[in-house]
Amino acid sequence: MLPVFGHLNPDTDAITSALVYARLLTRQGTEARAYRLGELNFETPYVLREAGLDAPELLPELAAGSRVALVDHNESAQSVPNLADLTVTHVVDHHKLGDLSTAAPAYLRFEPVGCTGTILLKLHREANVSVEPVDAKLMLSAILSDTLHFRSPTTTQADRDAVDFLAPIAGVGDVETYALAMFAAKSDLGDTPAETLLKMDYKVFPFGDVAAPQRWGLGVVETTNPAYVFGRQAELLAAMASAKTQDGLDGILLSVVDILNETNRTLVPGEVEAAVVQAVFGADTTGNVADLGARISRKKQIVPALETHFAL
Amino acid sequence: MLPVFGHLNPDTDAITSALVYARLLTRQGTEARAYRLGELNFETPYVLREAGLDAPELLPELAAGSRVALVDHNESAQSVPNLADLTVTHVVDHHKLGDLSTAAPAYLRFEPVGCTGTILLKLHREANVSVEPVDAKLMLSAILSDTLHFRSPTTTQADRDAVDFLAPIAGVGDVETYALAMFAAKSDLGDTPAETLLKMDYKVFPFGDVAAPQRWGLGVVETTNPAYVFGRQAELLAAMASAKTQDGLDGILLSVVDILNETNRTLVPGEVEAAVVQAVFGADTTGNVADLGARISRKKQIVPALETHFAL
């Protein structure tokens, strides 16, 4: 039984891609099962309910040497802590290739598209495997989630084509309405603790010198209701300060992305971060907030700019 | 114009995969051109003559930031010296994933099959691109070469299926006869200098501690005429000793693989190497030769065993 899982702080793509890829592998003769590496965000339960599925279980501790399949991530900092002791046999991902290596030849499929779901649809079609309605719903949801319904600059024609192909199979007549319902579910943050809000879509990236990298924590809250998030600014800044200390980070940022207006206002806790935000994005920090304009993609517009900055 | 190239000390798969993938990318809208990273072995000119093609040109020096596509390799030690300064946008490979990373999401296609040519055939079929006879001849030749016509333990069913599919398109009626002609061409080593013989199919592998690895040079001569090679044993041992010094290696081995009898007798220049060969393969070294039995695949039977040894 091959465990399949997405990244820590799972988003909709990390969860649904594990479910879809596990089923595809199983149908193709490799018994596989989906797991998750953490608590769901507020969007994914909506998607799973719509698909009539339960959430995958938390990944149990795996013995050294166990075979695993990764989806929607490949860097060790975003994966299970003992990844280096495991045998990665499959990866399907749409992120840059980080520090992954394999002990033996493996099956790796990376494409520069907006969502892992888009690649998974290709895998079905290339193998002439029928797309089940439940899988269509999961892949469709992941693409709408990752691309913010095509608003993100990570969107490619392949993502749009995939949605056109999947919507009728998934029984989604009005994609716009479905996407808005997903985003509303994601924005219904209620009394979520600030620590949880910060870490819901959060990744630690090493920048600069490979031997002694700077480590930055980069969180994103994608919401249709940014006013709610900024209403909790003091709490969030306190949570960021303690995460920075606890995780031994060099810097930490939390980007609040207004999905519908496609803007990014980022929480900047201190002077170190403010100086980097000024140098990299030319943005002033006022009252711990920097306006990063239309930079709504961490992957395409935030991480590469920081990477270039710290490489100098 | 995207340069496409295989590994240093190119073999038939490295050369033909660059040619085939460059043409496929071009047909799919990405203008690409095949290059090579070194002199051809004795088998590849036979294959190119049969296919009616000239050898690709040597890769010119590329400016930092240039986009490149890699085939049949991914580790920096086996690639162009300034790989770290280049932007890798595509990789098609069947080796383990080494130290490659990318600055941005890229197109990566790795499968644990016997030959890059087998993956390239899949890419054609998945994209519904017709397979031209010349490309069929190149992919067929690469698969026969890399798998020693299915003798190597790296051979998979996908490689066999690919040959069945390609042979009629390539106009090769008798695959066995064609493979033997390729192997005969490869074995016709004439008055090749010992240095050239050593380095013809030669790769440097880092083993053990990532920060301070042991570096071993592992050469292979696949031949239908091992007696010829052992007739030049003294010359070859001298060439190995100087390569070890010049390249600052911790160890060096040259495996003489008898293609038709599927055996490996390896040249062992010194005590350091003899101790490792004894510890890893349980093989004694007598007169600078160790009998490694049926271990005819460097990739599957030599490198992983050394890797495990030095990781301890």
Image (cartoon, coloured by chain):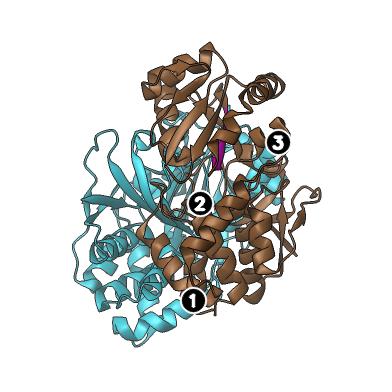
Chain colours: A brown, B cyan
Counting from the top left corner in percent of width and height, residue A217 is at 59, 29
Residue drawn at x 61%, y 64% as measured from the top left: A21
Q: CA distance from mark 3 to mark 2?
A: 20 Å
Compare residues A54 and A308 and report the one nearer the observer.
A54
Look at the picture and state if A7 lies above or below B262. Answer: above
**Alpha carbon distance from label 2 to label 1:** 20 Å
> Does the magenta-highlighted stretch encompass residue A179?
no
Chain name for mark 1: A
Task: State which tag comes first along the sequence, 3 or 2.
Answer: 2
Indicate the position of residue A84 as horizontal and vertical percent values.
67, 42
Using the image, tell me which numbered label, if any, was put on residue A168: 1
Q: Chain of mark 3?
A: A
Please tell me how crowded label 1 is: few (under 14), some (14-19), or many (20+) other residues with Cα within 10 Å: some
Question: Number of marks in the image?
Answer: 3
The residue wearing badge 2 is: A146
Q: Residue at x 19, y 66 (%)?
A: B53
Quarter that holds the C terminus of chain A: top left
Is residue B213 left or right of A35 when viewed as pictured? left
